Image (cartoon, rainbow, N blue to C red):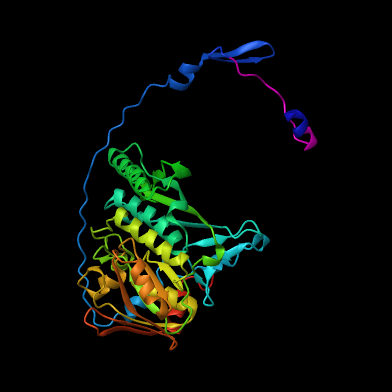
Amino acid sequence: RFSELMTNRDVEATIIGEFNNSKRCVVKYHKKTIMDIDMKFLHDGLPVRPMKTKLIKTTFKEPFIPELKNLNEVLLTMMKRLNIAGFDFISEQYDHEVQANSVIKPLQGIGKINGETSVVKPIFNSNRAVAISQGLYPSYSEIDCYQMAGSSIDTAVRNLVAAGVDIDKIHLLDNFCWCSSNDPQRLYQLKEAAKACYDFAKIYETPYISGKDSMFNDFKGYDEKGRSIKISIPPTLLISSIGLIEDVIKTISIDVKFPGDLVYILGETKEELGGSEYFALNKSIGNNVPNVEAKKNKRLYQDFYKAGQSQLISSAISITRGGLGIALAKTALAGKLGIEISLIDLPGKVFRNDFALFSESQGRILVTINPKNKSRLEKIMKGNQFKQMGIVTNNQELIIKDLNNKTIVNLDLEKIEKNYKSTFKNY
């Protein structure tokens, strides 16, 4: 039957052997035995290679960054950074509209802003959809590979949750790209990342369905003066995520939609800027990477899903690289509407305005809702950290007031968009 099936499809298929209970692998060529080996030795005969790990704790110098009263130029500069800037030139060059099944496209809203999650509906007459996203923070690796992996996992999960996916229907893929894996220090970092993959996936109950690894991303050679050099990538873990949406009508996009909607932040902001885009902007690394509180985050994600299923959410954006300031700018640009917010009583523990805007604390979602849904949302989110920060406006401006309610950002959306799309403008 198999041979007939292959023949009908013009596929050449030849039977080359059979399974038996001899517990040996025997291969013959022209009736001559060329291989005869015990299966136990074949699978288990290779001696175990003992490898040692070594913890080398690196402490980086904390940056001295003057605290500015106005953060307009800082935000505009952040919007141009390579890891934050718009890359619509890529999204517009490949066909993401095969069979007209995309629901949330790579570019979202009338502003065509790069989102973190895409959604497709594979079966035309079904309301079910599939969402895909990812998390990646190699800049955290040299500080703490365990929390680097945790942040990647939390972001990959949260990105889907913000689009309307039930956390109970998310699966992950771990994609390791590592360096010098024979080196005891790099091996220790690898072990820590793998441990985090296990620990956080157990808490979120998000199984790994696939993945890949590439363990020796190093170059050894010589420079132009003939001196021996070695160039290595940073320890890197990309976590990809895929989730099922039962009702595509309840999918959530990042773009603000209605003037007068209320703006909320869900989750806590702390002074966690080690390895952040803001510290990198100031040519620093720092030490305090985000500490992922998975159990607390999971409850927030579960409650957010309930709010989404009740259709209380107008828009939602996962707060990722660059922090709250970038999330505010992107969601405003996507919807081409202004936002006015205040950082007063921001949930968490942060004492500087710039740190409040650019901290990369995990577990946070920025949402907008119809004012009539205020009491229902707050009832669902009770027990979580959240705060109504402000309002969506029709004045095409992003206005941010600081921890003392003084204006620190007052920018036209047109100017923000110009900077956001300037980095790759001519590509």
Residue 19 in magenta stretch: yes
Q: Is residue 150 left or right of residue 313?
A: left
The one nearer the camera, 387 or 104, is: 387
Task: Report the residue at 30% width, 48% height from top.
Answer: 146
Quadrant (top left, top right, bottom left, bottom right) of the N terminus? top right
Task: Report the residue at 62% width, 11% height from top.
Answer: 33
Q: Is residue 128 left or right of residue 349?
A: right
| Residue 83 in sight from this viewpoint | no
Q: Position of residue 235 (x, y in %)?
A: 36, 48
The image quadrant of residue 187 is top left
Task: Report the residue at 42% width, 63% height from top.
Answer: 306
Q: Which residues are magenta?
A: 7-20
Q: Main secondary structure of the magenta part?
A: loop
The image quadrant of residue 184 is top left
Q: Position of residue 112 (x, y in %)?
A: 53, 73
Residue 168 in magenta stretch: no
Q: Position of residue 91 (x, y in %)?
A: 56, 65
In the image, residue 412 sits, relative to residue 424, either above or below, namely below
Q: Position of residue 410 (x, y in %)?
A: 34, 85
Quadrant (top left, top right, bottom left, bottom right) of the C terminus? bottom right
| Residue 383 in sight from this viewpoint | yes
The one nearer the camera, 15 or 84, is: 15
